[in-house]
Amino acid sequence: MADDTAVELPPLYESLTWLTPLSEERAAHLVAFLSDPAPARVLDMGCGWGELLLRVLMSAPQARGRGVDSASASIDRAGQQASARGLLNRVTFDLMPGAEAQYRPADALICIGASQIWGPPVEDAQPLDYAAALRSLRALVLPGGRLVYGEAVWSAVPHPAATAPLAGRDDEYLTADALHELIRAAGFEVVDEDLAGIQEWDDFESGYRGRFTRWLEAHDAHHPAAGQVRRQYEEQRAAYEEGYRGVLGMAYFCLAG
């Protein structure tokens, strides 16, 4: 059937600066935290297209960086951005499952929305294993180093309309308070913590849906796949606005090793 046609959507980086709900103001705060004291090595686990890592390297001109991700399109984009900013001589981007990079510690570390690297496969729809991620991250941070850890949490009590578009289970995520306790148990000092605001979420979700809008703008309304793309847009809008908006949160922690 036409609606089952595989559709190549525009890349997310065309409408999103970050693959996470993150404002420019918060990003600047995270970059400042990782840049002072100046790091020698910066490691980004699950780097996506590398925007935050590249900004840290621009803020800390003596540092060298490494980004690791399993998505080839993101790694390609990261390399392009590093070249455009004159940073190719100070950063490498590796296409590999993140767990394979555990043997290379750094004094500044980023891990945002990538705890699944150390947990069960995403397709298994199991609860996120924050504890396993934090234990592995602790081993990656050099003594005296710093970590920016960002991860999904429940910011309100989950209900069926919120969980249905996700994994369909109340135990998929923890609360921010419960995650705070796991962080301390892993041996980190919490320097700062905060939840993404609703405007950050609205901007992120709008950008995420932007790939559907851009595809529809670039194709005739009678294209065989147009109905499918319109349906995908509406499903994503409803999942957020009528489901997990204000329930699914994103917690950002600035941690000292």
Image (cartoon, rainbow, N blue to C red):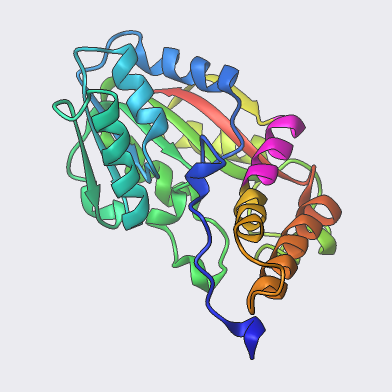
Q: Which of 61 and 111 is in front in this view?
A: 61
Image quadrant containing the N terminus:
bottom right
Residue 73 inside the magenta-drawn segment: no
The spot of residue 91 in percent (x, y) is 20, 31
Does residue 37 appear to the left or right of 192 in the view shown? Answer: left
The spot of residue 247 in percent (x, y) is 78, 46
Residue 199 inside the magenta-drawn segment: yes
The image quadrant that residue 218 belongs to is bottom right
* Residue occupying the point 65% across, 37% down: 176
The spot of residue 19 in percent (x, y) is 52, 43
* Residue occupying the point 77% across, 53% down: 240
Q: Is residue 195 above or below residue 120?
A: above
Q: Is residue 196 above or below residue 46?
A: above
Could you tell me if residue 187 is visible in this image?
no
Does residue 233 appear to the left or right of 16 in the view shown? Answer: right
The spot of residue 136 in percent (x, y) is 33, 45
Q: What stretch is highlighted in magenta?
A: 197-207
The image quadrant that residue 156 belongs to is top right
Secondary structure, magenta segment, majority class: helix
